Image (cartoon, grey):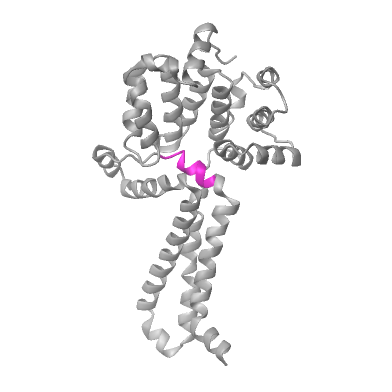
């Protein structure tokens, strides 16, 4: 009797809760790479001029609101929670609206209320799929890019051993993972890194190659790849990840004025602000670069080796 009572009175809560849990698991366990790709393709700046510019555009308020939400996808756990909450809000608002519109029908036919409850999941499903479009690369490239961003070299090699990737950038990511885990030396890695624009087959591929070029000391290619990735973003959006890389390259190339320009933008964000604040002293006092464990070594390498451009 108790079971029947709970099923009769709380089945809606059970379905709604189950749906929210399913949405969270979908994005956190299966598609975290998509959340990461969405975050690095939109930069929300906490600046009134930025807000005014967006609001002046047709449907700018919607783009502004979506950019505000996407900045939190930097943390994929938080991003998955946000999507689950948005789906439940969409369901609740739709159900409330339909409930008010069909009050008379519900009095004559009580089953209408259940139909309305289930139909209200349609907008929630639409909201759940919003982060999937557009992506800026193949599923394979998004997955490898996310793993590089996390520094999960073991998982990269597991994916590579399961199936050889189609993308040139993903194969390069696997080579980098082999180097990071001590399976190949630096010279072998350098021989396997493609010096061609064909590796930049999409936005995620460009991000992958930018990271690989930076780690192997090919700074000009890293800078070019980061720039190409950001310029491929729809609606002229900027990328926090690209600006971080462009800042690093500017510091290495002894271009403090350019680095400060990027830093001033990143300081107006949530997740990149602390990093930008750490970089500001290096841009304001370029002589400190030579003592930096990473930038100092790369600057010395750039001074001794000629620039490398696409062939």
The structure residue drawn at horizontal position 75% and vertical position 42%, both measured from the top left corner, is: 162
285 magenta-colored: no
Q: Where is residue 271 in the image (x, y as percent from the top left)?
A: 40, 41
Q: Is residue 309 visible?
A: yes
Q: Is residue 134 visible?
A: no
Instruction: In this rendered view, identify the residue nearer to me: 294 or 52.
Output: 294
The structure residue drawn at horizontal position 58% and vertical position 26%, both measured from the top left corner, is: 212
41 magenta-colored: yes
Name the dominant secondary structure of the magenta segment: helix
* Residue 275, above or below 131: above
**Left or right side of 210 for 163:** right
**Left or right side of 93 for 150:** right
Q: Which residue lies furthest to the bottom in this view?
A: 1
Image quarter of residue 163: top right
Quadrant in which the N terminus is drawn: bottom right
* Residue 301, above or below 7: above
Q: How many labels does the image show?
A: 0
Image quarter of residue 236: top left
Instruction: In this rendered view, identify the residue nearer to me: 230 or 134.
Output: 230
Q: Where is residue 48 in the image (x, y as percent from the top left)?
A: 24, 40
Q: Position of residue 155 (x, y in %)?
A: 66, 41
Instruction: In this rendered view, identify the residue nearer to me: 116 or 266.
Output: 266
Q: Where is residue 260 in the image (x, y as percent from the top left)?
A: 33, 23
Quadrant in which the C terminus is drawn: top right
Magenta range is 34-42
The structure residue drawn at horizontal position 49% and vertical position 8%, both measured from the top left corner, is: 303
* Residue 105, above or below 20: below
């Amino acid at each position: 009797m108790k079971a029947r009572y709970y099923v009769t009175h709380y089945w809606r809560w059970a379905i709604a809760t189950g749906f929210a849990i399913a949405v969270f698991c979908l994005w956190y366990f299966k598609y975290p790479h998509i959340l990461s790709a969405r975050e690095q393709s939109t930069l929300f700046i906490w600046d009134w001029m930025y807000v005014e510019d967006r609001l002046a555009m047709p449907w700018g308020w919607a783009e502004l609101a979506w950019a505000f939400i996407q900045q939190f996808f930097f943390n994929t756990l938080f991003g998955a929670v946000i999507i689950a909450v948005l789906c439940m809000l969409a369901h609740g608002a739709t159900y409330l609206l339909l409930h008010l519109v069909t009050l008379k029908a519900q009095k004559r036919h009580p089953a209408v209320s259940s139909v309305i409850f289930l139909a209200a999941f349609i907008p929630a499903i639409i909201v759940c799929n919003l982060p999937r479009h557009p992506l800026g690369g193949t599923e394979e490239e998004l997955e490898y890019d996310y793993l590089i961003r996390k520094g999960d070299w073991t998982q990269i090699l597991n994916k590579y051993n399961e199936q050889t990737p189609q993308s040139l950038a993903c194969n390069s990511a696997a080579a980098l993972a082999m180097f990071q885990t001590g399976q190949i030396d630096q010279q072998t890695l350098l021989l396997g890194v493609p010096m061609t624009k064909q590796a930049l087959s999409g936005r995620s591929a460009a991000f992958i190659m930018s990271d690989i070029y930076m780690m192997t000391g090919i700074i000009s290619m890293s800078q070019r790849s980061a720039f190409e990735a950001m310029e491929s973003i729809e609606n002229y959006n900027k990328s926090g990840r690209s600006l971080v890389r462009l800042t690093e390259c500017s510091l290495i190339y002894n271009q403090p004025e350019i680095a400060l320009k990027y830093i001033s933008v990143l300081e107006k964000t949530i997740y990149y602000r602390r990093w930008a604040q750490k970089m500001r002293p290096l841009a304001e006092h370029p002589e400190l670069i030579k003592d930096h464990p990473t930038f100092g070594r790369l600057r010395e390498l750039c001074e001794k080796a000629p620039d490398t451009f696409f062939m």
